[in-house]
Image (spheres, coloured by chain):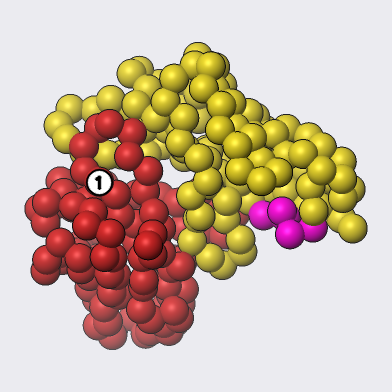
Chain colours: A yellow, B red
Amino acid sequence: EDQVTQSPEALRLQEGESSSLNCSYTVSGLRGLFWYRQDPGKGPEFLFTLYSAGEEKEKERLKATLTKKESFLHITAPKPEDSATYLCAVQAQYGGATNKLIFGTGTLLAVQP
Amino acid sequence: DTEVTQTPKHLVMGMTNKKSLKCEQHMGHRAMYWYKQKAKKPPELMFVYSYEKLSINESVPSRFSPECPNSSLLNLHLHALQPEDSALYLCASSQPGTSGYEQYFGPGTRLTVT
């Protein structure tokens, strides 16, 4: 069964304290792994797409990496405005031409000044 | 432009009311989605439209009725909802197909059923 697991469930950091969020996945035929940021009461904001093991992408203080079993979202010198829930999702290979995502339960990040 | 718009932002309705949620995108995407999200949970897929045809219905109760009038618009018609249907309803769009196209989400409609 296709599955996505994120850890930790919650993470509290001091401003400037770098850390990583983990997304482990079990899926047959990975088509893409996606990272989203979600602020309370708002829709998820797209951050990155990763397609194959070894791939890395960066945006400001965020860097996403991918292996055959997991992805990491590295946060370097975070600021309070980085506080949000970070969601990981995978697209698996299904019959037909439909794009269906499987989401993890998210990591709630709080960055304290 | 990667914007998906949703109206209304908030909606309060009684269990006997009929209301509709609207979603619009102008990115030329041909796949559109409805998700339901409860507090502290990830989005839960409800419906997928691909090229204006319903391609996935995740066993959603018939009190939710989707409609895709054209490639830019997506509606969700609501009738005889239950209090447990209160949630954030999200619309998303993407290119269709299985090639790892990212989905772009709207801001959501906060629905409260009284």
Amino acid type indicated by mark 1: Gln
Q: Residue at x 38, y 59 (%)?
A: B2
Please name whichever residue, A60 or B87, is drawn nearer the observer in this view of the structure: A60
User: Can you say whether A76 is above or below B15 in the image?
Assistant: above
Q: Which chain letter matches label 1? A: B
Q: Which residue is mark 1?
A: B95
Can you tell which quarter of the image residue B62 is in?
Answer: bottom left
Q: Main secondary structure of the magenta part?
A: helix
Q: What is the x, y in percent for residue A88? A: 53, 38
Q: What is the x, y in percent for residue B85? A: 40, 66
Q: What is the x, y in percent for residue B48? A: 23, 50
Left or right side of A47 for A77: right
Number of marks drawn: 1
Please name whichever residue, A8 or A75, is drawn nearer the observer in this view of the structure: A75
Please name whichever residue, B98 or B27, is drawn nearer the observer in this view of the structure: B27
User: Can you say whether A33 is above or below B30 in the image?
Assistant: above
Is B54 included in the stretch rendered in magenta?
no
Quarter of the rendering occupied by the C terminus of chain B: bottom left
Left or right side of A105 for B97: left
Q: Residue at x 48, y 49 (%)?
A: A46
Disc 1 residue crowd, few under 14, some 14–19, many 20+, Cα 10 Å: many
Residue B109 in sight here: yes
Which portion, as a residue range, is magenta? A80-84
Q: Residue at x 63, y 51 (%)?
A: A85
